[in-house]
Amino acid sequence: PDVSKLLAASRRSEDGARVHREAEERRRRNMINDRRSLPMFKHREALVDAIKKHQVLVVQSETGSGKTTQIPQYLVEEGFGRIVCTQPRRVAAMSVAARVADEMNVKLGSEVGYSIRFEDCTSDKTVIKYVTDGMLLREFLSQPDLKDYDVIIIDEAHERSMSTDIVMGLVKDIARFRGDDVRVVISSATLNTKKFSNYFDDAPVYTVPGRRFDVDILYTKAPEADYVDACCVTVLQIHAKEPKGDILVFLTGQEEIEAAEEMLKERTRGSGSKIGELIIAPIYATLPSEMQAKIFEPTPEGARKVVLATNIAETSVTIPGIVYVIDPGFCKQNSYNPKTGMESLLVVPVSRAGAKQRSGRAGRTQPGKCFRLYTKWSFLNEMDEDTVPELLRTNLCQVVLLLLSLGIDNLIDFDFLDAPPAEALLRSLEQLYALGALNEEGKLTKVGRRMAELPLDPMMAKALLASEEYGCSEEVIIICAMLSVNNAIFYRPKDKKVIADAARAVFSRGGGGDHMTLLNCFVQWRDYGYSHQWCRENFVQGRTMKRARDIRDQLDGLLDRVEIKRSSVGTGSKVPILKSFTSGFFYNACRLQKNGNYRTMKNPHTIQLHPSSCLARSEIRPRWLIYHELVFTSKEYMRQVFDIEGRWLFEVAPHFYGEEDVEDTSKRKMPKVVGKSGGRS
Ligand code: ADP
Ligand code: MG
């Protein structure tokens, strides 16, 4: 080998390393400066003092002031010990932890880490831990006084998520019990902190004034028929006409975000040279973390970034550089009807408080503009002032089960910030009783105890416990994992719909509805060595599948903890697998009507098969179905559905269904579906 060449190469690589090091040093210096310029920084001493002095402190300041990223660091620097900080959203927990690790110049998962359901990125060294509120709630099960933590920060309290509300109730108790040994910080981005202060025995409120620039608010003259389309039109108008500055668009979920992304790509194709480049950066809960980083990357000179976000960008995550906000005025919200026991995910108008938060995102670094894609009249007359706390509009089964397993038996007297309707509490007790989690006195059974150990919805937990009896726990955890990844498994490119549908139909061939389809899909992928190639050929999202695999592995670990034997029946025998799910989801059974619609068994109610279900495509409609969830778009749809035999209901839940409920009233022929069902929506 030529020594001089080697030397030259080594010098080049040294040069490269030096350039890289210098860039990194510059980046770090900037970051430190950024930290010092945050509104929170000027209040560092006073804030730390207040936390020393008061066991419970409410901190209020505008989004982006540094509550989430800075307060925990100040406390660590002052030797406060171990700090846990809750977030209502998993994406926020991950992204904020990554940012703080970077600011502290440590590896994510060492001194700074996060813990979200099915993913723990912490170690013994962790002193700042970001967790979802749901995860902290589960930690009460293993350590009811949370003695691992010296400071508990309940962040984004204004969001009033169900788990945050319950955590506050439990932490209030801990604060009394642990006394001076623990500090509690409640942090909120909205002004109505009085409620929190009163709740925590008149805890003092520390307000950090934010800096804020004017935001011009523009309304539409008439309501928009298709707001995703209207968003894209507005993005392109801003891009063509307005001065530089990035755009933030609020959409309701992944499906809309993907649709908007595609639309924008299509409409900007080939226009690159005339107007600057438009960089599209999506952010939603199930987006893989390496892709989330894109929203924080600085926009190159001459280009413009458009961030397509869910509600996450309203207060949990602050994106730098936003000057324009587009707000169609909707978000996705779960809603629960305690009368019927039905739960569904709805797209609803945001509240005025939410709309104000959204427009505020435009004025962080300079004056901005907010395009509200609704009329001023609807803002004033059709929107609620505040978002209803989640606890008041959700199925409480999971929370009730958890509280009961913490020994809190008297739920009516639990110190809720806002108590849920008694009817909803009763309904959840009834459901838990039906699932066998409670006995007739309302006390937790052994089954109930085991269900509470599983970080799953009680129905899913019950299905998993039942799989032991039916000898198919391996199959059931795969299906649970696949159901947990949010309907983002199969995709259908516009120009390849027919092939994509055909590929998917193969998984459904053996019957058993969407549940067996998901199982077959996973098992085939596994048999092909978890191959990417296989995913592409079958129009399956590789990264979603990887997430499903991670969840499957986590659930597999839980089997040991709850002492469920591993067993398998293979993909060939669907009856035991479906019976396991029937044991958990019998509440969601429905029956075919003469007119081809389905009606729920209890509290009769007409619902439709979601067009994405494999059963919506078959000619023959099964007489009995069980759905996994309801979604409401134009109609009330059941999503993820499997067919059963009516008598299974009586077999798995004789206390719930009478023989007369499930008998085959006639041997009449099944009505044929007239016409083909349409494409997936
Ligand atoms: P608050 O909790 O008060 O809303 P944060 O602590 O979340 O404020 O944010 C403080 C600052 O840190 C914001 O200016 C935000 O832009 C910045 N920041 C937060 N996360 C990141 C990130 N991942 N990358 C770059 N900047 C970030
Ligand atoms: Mg925050």
Image (cartoon, helix red, strand yellow):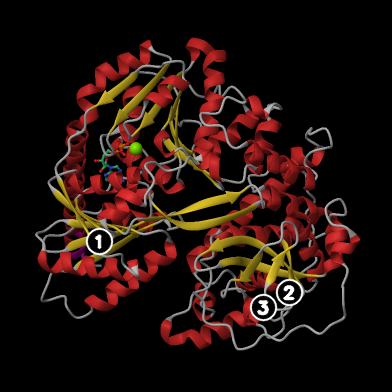
Which residue carries the number 3 mark?
508
Ligand 1 placement by image quarter: top left
Closer to us: 479 or 605:
605
Counting residues from the start of the chain, the first of labels 3 and 1 encountered is 1
Which amino acid type corresponds to the residue marked 3 in the rendered image?
Answer: Ser
Vertical side of 532 occupied by 186: above or below? above
For disc 2, the marked residue is 593
Report crowding for label 3: few under 14, some 14 to 19, many 20 or more residues within 10 A (C-alpha): many
**What residue is drawn where x is 62% and y is 60%?**
629
Task: Say what amino acid the circle numbered 2 marks.
Answer: Gln
Q: Quadrant of residue 99?
A: top left
Find residue 240 and report its horizontal and vertical position in percent: 13, 69
Magenta highlight range: 2-7
Q: Is residue 568 magenta?
A: no
SS for callout 2? loop
668 or 13, nearer to the observer: 668
What residue is shown at x 17% (from left), y 40% (from top)? 30
102 on left or right of 126: left
Distance between mark 3 and mark 1 Cα atoms: 38 Å
Mark 1, secondary structure of its residue: strand
Whether ligand 2 has any atom under 8 Å from the Cβ at mark 2 is answered as no
Position of 313 relative to 52 (above/below): below
Alpha carbon separation for disc pair 1 and 2: 47 Å
The secondary structure that dominates the magenta segment is helix
Q: Residues within 10 Å of mark 2 (few under 14, many from 20)?
A: some
User: Do the numbered discs 3 and 2 sit on residues whose CB atoms are within 8 Å?
Assistant: no
Q: Earlier in the sequence, mark 1 or mark 2?
A: 1
Relative to residue 559, is residue 242 drawn left or right?
left
Q: Is residue 98 above or below residue 553?
A: above
Specify the amino acid type for callout 1.
Val
Residue annotated with mark 1: 306
Towards the viewer: 523 or 468: 468
